[in-house]
């Protein structure tokens, strides 16, 4: 049994081991929801974006939105879960293999 | 009549927020030392709290949720926890100061030292928060606090030098004997007391206690736009009384007794009776606000059931938090720290905590998930951003000024 | 439409069928296929989510309160998610919050006027 908090914030690499960044959120599809992709930030601090990740729902005021995008998220990409590998945890656990490819 | 009584929440919030013991003494001190040269700060503070309280009230009326409930969603649990701990500490020590203020008012009436009144006041406060209905508390203390209007009326009996007052109002800045540093120190203290975070959280949670629906948006707004300016007017009352009585003779105000004396000079025994009643109601109201806010913010952070609208057994954690907060406030007072000094420190620390409180409110008020079409328009966002800048400036300047002027010197 | 676990679920208020607050979504449980199976709420789940020294301390305090495992709400009890997570069941049917029950038992219930 995994918890979302075990995955969010983890460093991830691609299939070949090149670092991609850190997981910032998990994208789910279907009913019941199943994780299909991860939002990964390449560089920059990881933190809540105050809600600006989702365009259209929270809008402005523009100075805050701009500041949030600049300060908190520099490079945000969506990576399908099957293309990810979780990097080893700092206390030396061996790398967890990515999820069973579907 | 029902409509009129509907705005008592706003009045109570404003009275408890604007004329608590800190405002009474810092308003009076500022009046004694600078005349009414800080009146613009009160105006700026009133506009600021109106802007943000309107947003908070709108969020609550439309979504049925209190604003602090939403802070954790926006900031994330770690940052919101730091926010909670900071604002809880400030709220609880302010609660202690308000209890001290109530006790000081009773000391004025009875000559028994204020510390002997503290346990009784704390018990009364706890009983009120345990059993008395929210609306009843609102009405009694909100309306009794209006007795403070005697301050504003009484000024005319004191033969004020209107020309001198006008000069002070139009020339913001230090008077002879004061420096720009102390001037700005008092400006920040007055501003922080106008925009204390617990006011907005209390107001929003109070809206949930009153079961506001989208139809109550008008009531919510009336509460804000009538209640807070009224509170500002009462705060100004203390300032102008001190400006008329103490400033011309160069005397400082340090005690509650000095702050209420002018009303007695103007209107005799009736004046004194009304103003002490008003001070009692305002400080007791502020003690209720801070006590409940301490419970509201902790419960809303963790997602617990809360509120006086539920019977205590359905909100055990909330009521325990309120009780514990009261005990901490009493303990702080029993260290015999001067309640007035305690509040001044708390004001400065509140100024530092303001940005972390107001940023999420501004963000939430723009979220269509909660507000649908009623998100902030351009004006609300413009005002919100302007005040955020002011708030950040005050937060940055607060502690250096406090150190530099040695707490106002 | 895609659901974002962090944005749409985590740290949202959970309300039961009658609008009674149940807790916050402190964490989300996933099975081996990474399907969302349950919502986790309560001190233990919160402690583990925060992590660090403070998180461990909170979790340990919760364990001492007889909270053997975190409060778990199966995902199929969720009716819909908007500004809050709305359940289709009443709060009484869910595992009760340990701290609330403990305080009610040992403190609140003993004070006169605690409940009609």
Image (cartoon, grey):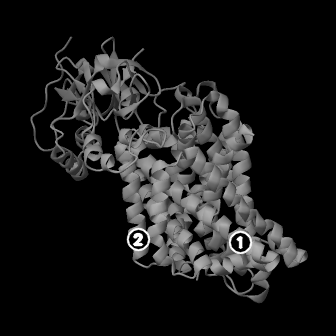
Question: In the structure shown, which secondary structural element does the residue marked by tag 1 occupy?
Answer: helix
> Relative to A10, does residue B261 appear above or below in the rendering?
below
Which of the numbered marks, if any, corresponds to residue B332? 2
**Residue drawn at x 79%, y 78% as measured from the top left:** B268
Q: Which mark is residue B309?
A: none
Disc 1: which residue? B273
Where, quadrant-wise, is the C terminus of chain B in this rendering? bottom right
Question: A82 left or right of B245?
Answer: left
> Which chain's residue wears label 1?
B
Residue B396 position in % (x across, y down): 53, 63
* Quadrant where the image shows the N terminus of chain B: top right
Kindly indicate the quadrant of the structure image that contains residue B263.
Answer: bottom right
Left or right of B15 on screen, residue A17: left
Question: Around disc 2, counting alpha carbons within 10 Å, would you say few (fewer than 14), some (14 to 19), or many (20 or more)?
Answer: many
Residues at marks 1 and 2, CA–CA distance in whole angstroms: 29 Å
Tell me what residue is drawn at x 74 percent, y 77 percent.
B242
How packed mark 1 is, by other alpha carbons closer than 10 Å (few <14, some 14-19, many 20 or more), is some
* Up/down of B277 relative to B313, above or below: below
Q: Chain of mark 2?
A: B
Of marks 1 and 2, the one in the foreground: 1
| Image: A29 above or below C7 | above
Q: Is residue B377 left or right of residue A80?
A: right
Q: Quadrant of residue B179?
A: bottom right
User: Residue B214 location in percent, x, y?
Assistant: 63, 28
Of residues A3 and B135, the one nearer the viewer is B135
Where does the image place residue B123, in percent across and percent down from the top left?
Answer: 44, 62
Task: Give coordinates of residue B91: x percent, y percent.
Answer: 47, 59
């Amino acid at each position: 049994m995994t918890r979302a908090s075990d995955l969010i914030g983890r460093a991830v690499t691609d299939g070949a081991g090149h670092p991609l960044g850190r997981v910032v959120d998990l994208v789910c599809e279907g009913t019941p929801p199943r994780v299909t992709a991860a939002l990964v930030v390449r560089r920059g601090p990881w933190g809540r974006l105050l809600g600006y990740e989702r365009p259209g729902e929270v809008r402005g005021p523009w100075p805050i939105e701009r500041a949030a995008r600049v300060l908190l998220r520099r490079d945000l990409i969506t990576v399908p879960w099957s293309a990810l590998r979780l990097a080893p945890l700092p206390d030396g656990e061996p790398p967890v293999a990515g999820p069973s490819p579907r | 009549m029902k409509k009129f009584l509907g705005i008592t929440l706003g009045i109570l919030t404003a009275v408890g927020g604007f004329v608590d013991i800190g405002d009474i003494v810092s308003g009076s001190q500022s009046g004694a030392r600078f005349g009414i040269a800080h009146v613009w700060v009160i105006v700026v503070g009133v506009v600021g709290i109106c802007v943000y309280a309107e947003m908070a009230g709108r969020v609550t009326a439309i979504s049925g949720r209190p604003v602090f409930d939403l802070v954790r969603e926006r900031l994330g649990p770690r940052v919101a926890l730091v926010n909670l701990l900071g604002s809880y500490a400030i709220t609880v020590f302010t609660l202690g100061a308000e209890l001290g203020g109530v006790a000081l008012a009773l000391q004025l009436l009875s000559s028994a030292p204020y510390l002997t009144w503290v346990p009784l006041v704390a018990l009364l406060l706890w009983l009120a928060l345990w059993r008395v209905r929210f609306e009843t508390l609102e009405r009694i203390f909100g309306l009794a606090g209006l007795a403070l209007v005697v301050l504003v009326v009484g000024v005319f009996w004191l033969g004020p030098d209107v020309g001198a007052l006008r000069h002070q109002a139009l020339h913001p800045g230090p008077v002879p004997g004061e420096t720009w540093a102390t001037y700005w120190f008092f400006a920040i203290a007055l501003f922080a007391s106008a925009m204390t975070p617990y006011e907005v959280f209390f107001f929003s949670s109070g809206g949930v206690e009153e079961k506001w629906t989208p139809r109550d948006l008008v009531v919510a707004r009336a509460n804000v736009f009538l209640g807070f300016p009224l509170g500002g007017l009462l705060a100004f009352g203390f300032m102008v009384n001190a400006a008329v009585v103490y400033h011309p003779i160069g005397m400082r105000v340090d005690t509650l007794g000095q702050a209420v004396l002018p009303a007695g000079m103007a209107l005799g025994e009736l004046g004194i009776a009304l103003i002490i009643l008003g001070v009692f109601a305002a400080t007791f109201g502020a003690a209720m606000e801070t006590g409940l806010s301490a419970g509201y913010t902790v419960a809303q952070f963790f997602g617990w059931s809360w509120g006086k609208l539920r019977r205590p057994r359905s909100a055990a954690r909330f009521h325990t938090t309120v009780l514990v907060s009261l005990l901490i406030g009493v303990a702080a007072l029993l260290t015999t720290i001067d309640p007035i000094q305690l509040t001044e420190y708390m004001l400065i620390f509140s100024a530092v905590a303001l940005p972390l409180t107001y940023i999420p409110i501004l963000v939430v008020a723009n979220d269509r998930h909660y507000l649908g079409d009623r998100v902030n328009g351009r004006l609300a966002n413009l005002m919100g951003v302007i005040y955020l800048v002011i708030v950040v400036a005050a937060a940055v300047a607060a502690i250096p000024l406090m150190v530099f002027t040695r707490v106002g010197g | 439409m895609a659901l974002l676990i962090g944005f749409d679920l985590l740290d949202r208020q959970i309300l039961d069928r009658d609008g009674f607050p149940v807790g916050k979504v402190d964490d989300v449980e996933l099975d081996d296929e990474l399907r969302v199976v349950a919502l986790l709420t309560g001190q233990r789940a919160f402690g583990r989510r925060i992590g660090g020294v403070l998180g461990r301390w909170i979790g340990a305090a919760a364990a001492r309160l007889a909270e053997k495992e975190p409060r778990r709400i199966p995902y199929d009890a969720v009716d819909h998610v908007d500004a809050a997570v709305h359940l289709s069941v009443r709060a009484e049917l869910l595992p009760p919050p340990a701290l609330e029950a403990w305080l009610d038992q040992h403190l609140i219930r003993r004070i006169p006027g605690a409940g009609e």
